[in-house]
Image: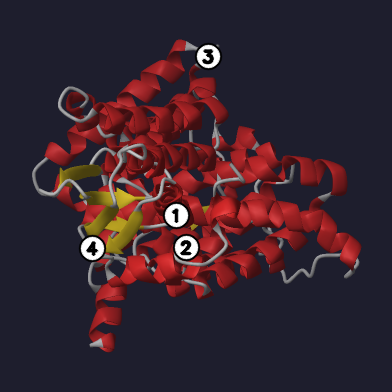
Amino acid sequence: MLLSSTKQDWFGNLRGDILAGLVVALALIPEAIAFSIIAGVDPKVGLYASFCIAVVIAFVGGRPGMISAATGAMALLMVSLVKEHGLQYLLAATLLTGVLQILMGALKLGSLMSFVSRSVVTGFVNALAILIFLAQLPELTDVTWHVYAMTGAGLAIIYLFPHLPVVGKIVPSPLICILACTAFAMFAGLDIRTVGDMGELPDTLPIFLWPDVPLNLETLKIIFPYAAALAVVGLLESLMTATIVDDLTDTKSDKNRECKGQGVANISAGLLGGMAGCAMIGQSVINVKSGGRGRLSTLVAGSVLLVLVVFMNEWVSEIPMAALVAVMIMVSIGTFDWSSIKNLRTYPLSTNIVMISTVVVVVWTHNLAFGVFAGVLLAALFFANKVSHFMYVESKLDEDSSTRRYSVHGQIFFNSADKFVDQFDFKEAVEKIVIDLTAAHFWDITGVHALDMAVLKFRREGAEVEVIGLNEASETIVDRFGVHDKPDQIEKVLGGH
């Protein structure tokens, strides 16, 4: 079974994976250079990181067909570290990032993705599509008409080439776009911006490099805050991307293995002079749309990237940025969930608010983690509010008017506790109160405290109180934290009043 699964992951889609890997390798080059510039380091640091992370994650990652490399979200977190302490401390922080991610994987934090609602994922995807598009605008600002013409021609090739018989289904159209635009620009001698203008490409293979920093507590104090932020943001983006690729390919992935894999990949990158990275949704979508499905596509992308920038850098430097802009615009269009706009009319208001808030926060801050945290928080608040509305109490007075029975239905927790207490009439003159909790469930200490308040208030008014019907889980938390059945607690709970 394991052998069959491994064979499928690596060789189940040979042609598609190889061709998709070639497309991704070409698309990775300008992004890796751009992210290096954002972080304030030499382009080599981003390119070596992208090569190393992609190759390593192909073997140890939990999501076949997903592309991991240097990313903008991670680069933004490195700026002040590089500015204040230099490259060597960045490499040390990259190693610590990897260690923290392996620990997170061992603690099975990948399962926390179950708390991310569909509306948050949709907002994340839409925000990323917008950011990918906005990132292309500098390449389309204050440029000659040739750039616009080439970008338009590139998009035409991307969308029309697949309709050609036979060959249109075999070769990925983004690869044809890059090759055709590069050939035309070189032949026509067009004076337009190329990959070579982004920065100097490396001309040597990466070498093993232990960070040149003192191994003491002072160094740890400097790098730990950055490493912790990098580890969290990297895993968040990677797990969100894995979820999206799961949907695109209709397959499952091992999120905890992905956590550990990202950690191993970042440790490897740090030891080869690269910066920390994570999964890239844009490149992963390019890979899937170009036919990549297995681990081989990720390995090819990383390996070909290194070969291109080291041994074919003269040719690669001639690729027009307009061709790569066309590919990235295709990615942004393909990434955006267009059905979410139509669904705004039919989905609940709370779902729409969560989705739109995630988009706004991500686009506003350019930080994917902030957007996802905001979306998850809002979704949790809306859920808590919705659940609390389903809590109600039925009241019935016995025939002899001496006993009042309250039957509680629903979930008692921090958001419904006050409503629970408000359902009781503490001033009613009856001998006995029965609180029937058969159809209720207590979730937290706030709920238990509300039950204590109700029972003790009734007793203060002179009524005998009987609590019945607690289920096993509720009884456990009430026995442990409740005080209404413990002597001498009434003053403590009621504040001495």
Instruction: Tell which circle, 4 or 3, labels the residue nearer the N-terminal end.
Output: 3
Secondary structure under tag 4 reads: loop
Type of amino acid under label 4: Thr
Quadrant hosting residue 270: bottom right
Instruction: Kindly identify the amino acid type of the residue bearing the numbered disc 2.
Output: Gly
Q: Disc 3 residue type? A: Val
For label 3, the SS is: loop
Q: Which residue is mark 4?
A: 251
Q: CA distance from mark 4 to mark 2?
A: 46 Å
Which mark is first along the chain, 1 or 4? Answer: 4
Quadrant (top left, top right, bottom left, bottom right) of the C terminus: top right
State which tag comes first along the sequence, 1 or 3: 3
Q: How is the image coloured?
A: secondary structure
Quick check: 294 left or right of 193?
left
The residue to which callout 2 is attached is 482
* Earlier-in-chain disc, 2 versus 1: 1
Question: CB atoms at circles 1 and 3 under 8 Å apart?
Answer: no
Q: Tell me the tag on residue 143.
A: 3
In the image, residue 308 lies at what x, y percent?
A: 53, 54
Measure how far apart labels 2 and 1 are at the Cα level. Answer: 6 Å
The amino acid type of the residue labelled 1 equals Asp
Point out residue 209 in the picture as x, y percentages from the top left corner. 76, 68
Q: Nearer the viewer, residue 181 or 84?
A: 84
Q: CA distance from mark 4 to mark 3?
A: 43 Å
Asked if the residue under mark 1 is in contact with the one under mark 4, i.e. CB atoms within 8 Å, the reply is: no
Above or below: residue 363 compared with residue 404: above
Q: Residue at x 69, y 57 (%)?
A: 227
Residue 128 shown left or right of residue 104 in the figure = left
Return the residue at label 1. Answer: 452
In what element is the residue under mark 2? loop
Residue shown at 57% from the left, 71% from the top: 102
The x, y position of residue 431, in whole percent, is 29, 51
